[in-house]
Image (cartoon, grey):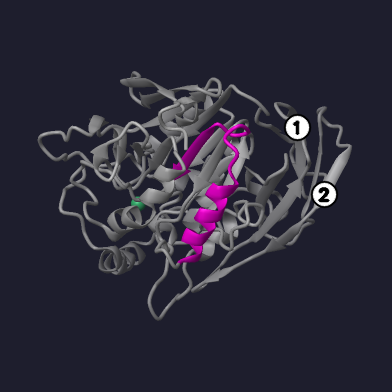
Amino acid sequence: MGFSGRPKCYVFAIFVVFVGFVGADDYVRPPAGRSLYASLSDDHSSTSPQQVHISLAGNGKMRVSWVTKETTPSTVKYGKSQGKYDASNTGTSSSYKYIVYKSGQIHDVVIGPLEPNTTYYYKCGLDSSPELSFQTPPAQFPIDFAVSGDLGQTEWTKSTLEHIGKTGYDVLLLPGDLAYADFYQPSWDTFGRLVEPLASQRPWMVTQGNHEVERIPFIHKERFTAYNARWHMPFEESGSSSNLFYSFDVAGVHVIMLGSYTDFGPDSNQYKWLECDLKKIDRKQTPWLFALVHAPWYNSNSAHQGEKESTRMRDSMEALLYNARVDIVFAGHVHAYERFTRVYKEEADKCGPVHITIGDGGNREGLATKYKDPQPNLSVFREASFGHGQLRVVNASHAQWTWHRNDDKQPDSVWFTSLASDSACVV
Ligand SMILES: [Fe+2]
């Protein structure tokens, strides 16, 4: 699994396939940060756990995932004191093939139920493995989310992660485009090693972007092979039939993770699941309701205009989210930051969701710097800089959103009032 860089002929071949697959943008991106591939080379032993990350798995449980080169026990030992593990659970492991690449053993273990707002110490696999720790989210408000899309693995990504790590967040939300492996599977491994220091300490909840599809016609027909194998999200726990769309509750917030690159029409499994999921929500239990997609439904950047994952998905699902009074829709895909006012059917609507594009995590494609001019009335704030978002949900009615540039300051800050607390919007 170790490597120090992408072979040039490989990169060219993949570029040809990729451009043919997704189409080219009509804007020129500025240079991105230097790639971290080489510095993420692999010095782990064959049985040592690497790429550890955790995710919420429903009912106070946590899923722990890691990779080993050789088969080792899929067991997590854990407890509330350092070096003292009074509980354990064993899960499963698997590997996948992608053309000539074969992954290591990907371990998947659910532990708990766990106490909220508590630090747990844990070991993955063998007793000789290093001790790690994570903190569970609170059961009640306040709760802090970090939000970052289109991460990749460059020096800008590193900067974004360093900033996020200092925020004291409880749960990370990632609206798609993780590793930018783009068919070169060892890049999934380097991405796993890059994010492990954060992703092994706090739950990372992700949904897929176009860079996760990785289907090559006639060569590798399955979609999302690596993503589904490596980033198992709690879809079974939320009654979904696919890892590509799911939901979860945390501390008074219901979060819906939608899939922009799987079927979303009225006859699709995703649409039917979303209808059921929305009906089950009790706003007394979860006064806040967020949704994540990858391709933004509202976007005044020149990049990614008119893609069907934006326009047709919005046509199909916007009414469902509006009628359920979703508070905020986060998106990625466009490598910039943009915040819209509350909106429905392309008009300002005080009972519609706020749409926020946060695709500025730091990937190698660079920033999307061109915008439609003049700025549409619906667009409140927009800027093409690398950064990340923080959302502090203070109580059932108030939350503060801030967008932070990695370079310097916090240019955008706004307080949101939940739609569940607005008598004019209660349904
Ligand atoms: Fe994307």
Q: Residue reaching furthest left?
A: 374
Residue beneath disc 1: 120
Residues at marks 1 and 2 touching, judged by CB atoms closer than 8 Å: no
The residue depicted at 71 percent of the width and 33 percent of the height is: 133
Q: Which residue is at the front of the view, 402 or 236? A: 236
Disc 2 Cβ-to-ligand 1 distance below 8 Å: no
On the rendered structure, is 254 left or right of 35? right
Of pointers 1 and 2, the one earlier in the residue sequence: 2
Residue visible at 45% across and 47% down in the picture: 38
Question: Where in the figure is residue 61, as x and y percent of width and height?
Answer: 73, 43
What's the amino acid at mark 1? Tyr
Position of the N terminus by quadrant: bottom right
Quarter of the view holding residue 181 = bottom left
Q: Position of residue 256 (x, y in %)?
A: 51, 46
Q: Which of 115 and 313 is in front in this view?
A: 313
Question: What is the magenta range?
Answer: 268-292
**Image position of 138 with respect to 273: above or below:** above
Q: Which element is circle 2 on?
A: strand
Label 2 is placed on what type of residue? Asn
Q: Nearer the viewer, residue 80 or 30?
A: 80
Query: Percent position (x, y) of residue 279?
Result: 56, 49
Disc 1 under 8 Å from ligand 1? The reply is: no
Mark 2 lies on residue: 89
Q: Per the image, is 209 magenta?
A: no
Q: What element carries label 1?
A: strand
Residue beneath the point at 29% across and 41% down: 32
Residue 177 position within the rendered picture, expressed as x and y whole percent measured from the top left: 41, 50
